Structures are given as structure tokens and as C-alpha cells.
Image (tube, rainbow, N blue to C red):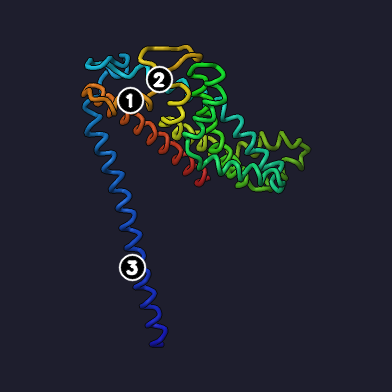
Amino acid sequence: MSVAMSLHQRRKRKNAVMMALCVIAAGIGLAWLALILGALIYKGLSGVSLAVFTEMTPPPGDAGGLLNAIYGSIVMTIIGIVVGTPIGVLAGTYMAEYGRFSRLTTVVRFINDILLSAPSIIVGLFVYELLVRPMGHFSAIAGAVALSILVIPVVVRTTEDMLNLVPNALREAGTAIGAPRWVVIRSVAYRAALSGIVTGILLAIARISGETAPLLFTALNNQFWSSNLNAPMASLPVTIFQFALSPYEEWQQLAWTGALIITLTVLGLSILARSLTGRREDR
């Protein structure tokens, strides 16, 4: 009995030590996050005004806003999502529904994992060689293509994982009433995995909304308003990058404000994605 009690006490002490280490590590991570958010709010909130959303990026030494940069980011993000999401969903559907045990699925999954962890600047260089050099100029189209490439692996992974979580009994029930396979996938599997797929799309939006490196090589930037997709276009991440490195206080303030806007947008999308995941788990 004494040996068993001694072993129990040692295990309790080890468990307490490990729990304390985990709490300390989590606290350190949360502390850095709090410091970053605190700095963004402290530096960026003072610059938030109506002019930020209604005026163009200013010349050096003048006041202005971020309207053209916000517009460019929204346009390229929407195009990137519209192009990348169907490809990702269809690829994930094939991997989960048609080729779950095929060698092609293994290869695609391996390549997809590489794309998930690949630096975004590599994607920017790839699109630069693919589109920018042959076209002879930077453009919003090239920027949107770069963003769509970053969207695809995120959507592929979440679509495959969510469809794999759908019970096979639901598919068998649909097949038993004589429904074709594509109807079963559309009406049964997609409906059951819809919240998870939407969560993946939201996470993809959150990822590309703050990407700077791919846009430096593709869309570059534009100091003025431009709705021409075949010309350089301003974007919020690139504008923040350029303004933050400038010696002008007005530009630096706009950079802090733009960083705050992006951060709050990403946090909002992450919270929305988390809420959708929680609703799915509740079901």
C-alpha cells in the first residue's frame, strides 16, 4: 500500500509540475498577444477617423486616408476567394469522396501540405514570372492570382477534413433511395459539412487579408484611386509596409491605423469561424 501511495504522490507532483509549465507557456503566449494588441490599439486608435475611410493615401507630409488601399485589398481578396474557393472545394471533394484511398490523393495531399507551409513570397515570385514579366507590368489581376493560390491549400484541407467527418451512414442512406453519387454529395455530404467548409473559407480570407510579400511582386502599389484590374493597385498591407518605413509622422500614423484595421478584421473572421465550428460541434 505504501509503495502504491508513493507512486501516486510522485505522479501527482509530476502532473502538477507539467500543468504549471503549460500554464506558464500559455501565459507567455497570451502576454505577447496582449502586448501586440495593446500597442496596436494605443498607436492606431488615435488615428481612426472618417477621413481614413473616405480619403486617398496622401503625399509626404500631408494628411489623408486609406480609401484606395482598403478598396484594393477588398477587390483582390474577393477575386482571390472567388477563384481559389471552387478549386479548393472540388479538390477536397475528390480527395474525400472519390479518391479517398487512391495514390493521386496521397500525392495531392502531400503537395497541399507543402503549399500550406510554403512562404508566401515564393508564391509572389512564381506569379511574377508567370504573369507580371510576360505582361510587362504589375497588375491587380496578378495580385489576385497570387492570393488565390494561397487560398487553395487552406480550403482543400478543411473541405477534405470536414467531408471525412461526415458519417458514411448518411451517404449510404442517400444511395439506398436511389440517388446518384453526385446528388448524395451535394445534398447530404455538403450540407453536413457546410459550417466546416465555410470556416475554412473564412480562415483563408483571414490569411490572405494581411499578406504583403505576394502583392509586392504582383500588384505593387498605387498612390491614387484605381479600379483598373490590369494596372497596379493599392493594397492595405503594402501601404502599411511602405508608410511604416517612411520618416513622415502622418504616414506612420496611417500605418498604425491600417495595421489595427487588418488585425481587427482578422480577429473578427477568426471569431466567426470559431463560432461556426462550435455550432457544428453542438449538432
Q: Residue at x 50, y 43 (%)?
A: 117
Residue 154 placement, left or right of 264: right
Q: Residue at x 62, y 39 (%)?
A: 92
Image spot of residue 85 (x, y percent): 57, 30
Circle 2 Cα neighbour tier, 10 Å, few/some/many (<14 / 14–19 / ≥20): many
Of the image marks 3 and 1, the number of the one nearer the N terminus: 3
Q: Amino acid at mark 2?
A: Asn
Query: Decide: marks 1, 2 in contact (CB < 8 A)?
Result: yes
- Secondary structure at numbered mark 2: loop
- Rendered position, 212 above or below 71: below
Q: Which mark is residue 221?
A: 2
Q: Amino acid at mark 1?
A: Gln
Of the image marks 1 and 2, the number of the one nearer the N terminus: 2
Q: Residue at x 51, y 46 (%)?
A: 281
Which residue position is annotated with label 1?
A: 242
Circle 1 Cα neighbour tier, 10 Å, few/some/many (<14 / 14–19 / ≥20): some
Closest to the observer, 216 or 203: 216
- Secondary structure at numbered mark 3: helix
Which residue position is annotated with label 3?
A: 17
Image spot of residue 94 (x, y percent): 68, 38
